[in-house]
Image (spheres, helix red, strand yellow):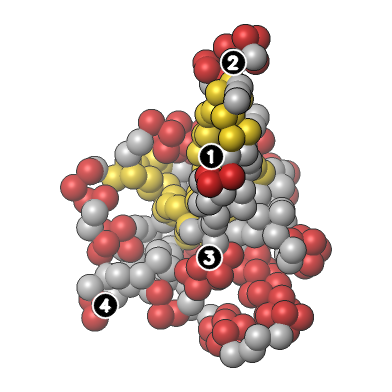
């Protein structure tokens, strides 16, 4: 940021922001691990999705230069318009959050936080691994949810446990983690065979354990044809289903930075799955 401001004045170089992995929030969907069974209710998951202020995250983490996302597809991808029309979006909307949690049987207690009919306060947790950026993300997201009436409990996963796949798969509430920027890899993340278990030594990227036979069927169909129209239709249907069920939320795209001096011609912003220097053989320095 400092270099960008300096170069904007001195004209000594340029800075490109390059989207990388999609920071994703998984909601625990395995009854044996979930801390509050309310998270298994789609109304509750949709309510929490409306409590994510993507604009605030973008401003705080990337000075407004990041990407606001509602799916795992980059806006420059050819399938993006169809995906964008088909998916259910959850813009920041505390009123809608309130309505959905009320429909799910919650009410506000004396302190203004949502509680169950039995009077038990709804206190889901959000876990992230440690980094300066993720710690800021954690603070912003939990504070925003608390302002909306959900008493979120922040938790930073210790360094040793961050490498423990079992620990990261058996979280009780919500978990923040990065999903591949490549569309196909992102789609493969949420299949049943990506759910970690003891039999797979807890490998797999479907951290929340969401299982959908229909989603699995669509991915098989996607990989079973070379027809572009059919593949697009299957991809759109998968992302539509994910958005409707809301077992996981795309929050924002991480940003990498490419800095280059004024005399260099050739660097340019690429699609997230592309190598930043793929065309380096064409660069010229004057």
> What secondary structure is found at the residue carrying circle 3?
helix
Q: Which residue is mark 1?
A: 255
Q: For this rendering, which residue is in front, 272 or 285?
A: 285
Q: CA distance from mark 2 to mark 1?
A: 22 Å
Distance of label 3 from label 4 (alpha carbons): 20 Å
Mark carried by residue 43: none
Which residue is found at the position 27% from the left and 62% from the top?
A: 165
Q: Position of residue 196 (x, y in %)?
A: 33, 72
**Quadrant into which the N terminus falls:** top right
Residue position for label 2: 12
Query: Which residue is identified by label 3?
Result: 186
Provide residue 272's location: percent of width, then percent of height.
57, 52
Report whether residue 198 is seen: yes
Q: Is residue 59 left or right of residue 201?
A: right
Relative to 284, is 240 above or below?
below
Is mark 1 in CB contact (under 8 Å) with mark 3?
no
Q: Earlier in the sequence, mark 3 or mark 4?
A: 3
Query: What residue appears at the point 62 percent right and 52 percent down from the top-left corner?
Result: 271
Comparing labels 2 and 1, the label whose residue is closer to the camera: 2
């Amino acid at each position: 940021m400092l270099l960008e401001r300096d170069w904007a004045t001195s004209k000594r170089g340029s800075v490109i922001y390059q989207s990388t992995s999609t920071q994703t929030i998984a909601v625990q969907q395995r009854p044996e691990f979930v801390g509050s069974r309310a998270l298994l209710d789609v109304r509750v998951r949709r309510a929490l999705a409306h409590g994510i202020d993507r604009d605030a995250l973008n401003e705080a983490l990337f000075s407004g230069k990041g990407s606001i996302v509602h799916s795992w597809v980059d806006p420059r991808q050819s399938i993006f318009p169809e995906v964008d029309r088909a998916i259910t979006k959850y813009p920041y909307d505390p009123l809608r959050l309130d309505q959905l949690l009320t429909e799910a049987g919650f009410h506000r207690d004396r302190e203004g936080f949502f509680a169950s009919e039995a009077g038990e306060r709804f206190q889901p947790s959000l876990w992230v691994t440690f980094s300066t950026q993720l710690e800021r993300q954690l603070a912003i997201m939990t504070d925003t949810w608390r302002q909306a009436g959900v008493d979120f409990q922040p938790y930073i996963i210790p360094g040793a446990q961050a490498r423990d796949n079992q620990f990261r798969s058996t979280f009780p509430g919500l978990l923040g983690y990065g999903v591949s920027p490549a569309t196909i890899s992102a789609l493969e993340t949420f299949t049943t065979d990506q759910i970690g278990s003891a039999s797979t030594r807890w490998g797999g990227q479907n951290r929340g354990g969401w299982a959908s036979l229909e989603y699995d069927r669509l991915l098989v169909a996607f990989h079973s044809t070379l027809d572009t129209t059919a593949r697009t239709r299957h991809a759109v249907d998968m992302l539509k289903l994910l958005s409707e069920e809301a077992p996981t939320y795309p929050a924002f795209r991480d940003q990498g930075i490419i800095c280059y001096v004024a005399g260099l011609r050739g660097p340019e912003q690429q699609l997230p799955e592309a190598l930043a220097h793929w065309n380096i053989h064409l660069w010229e320095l004057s």
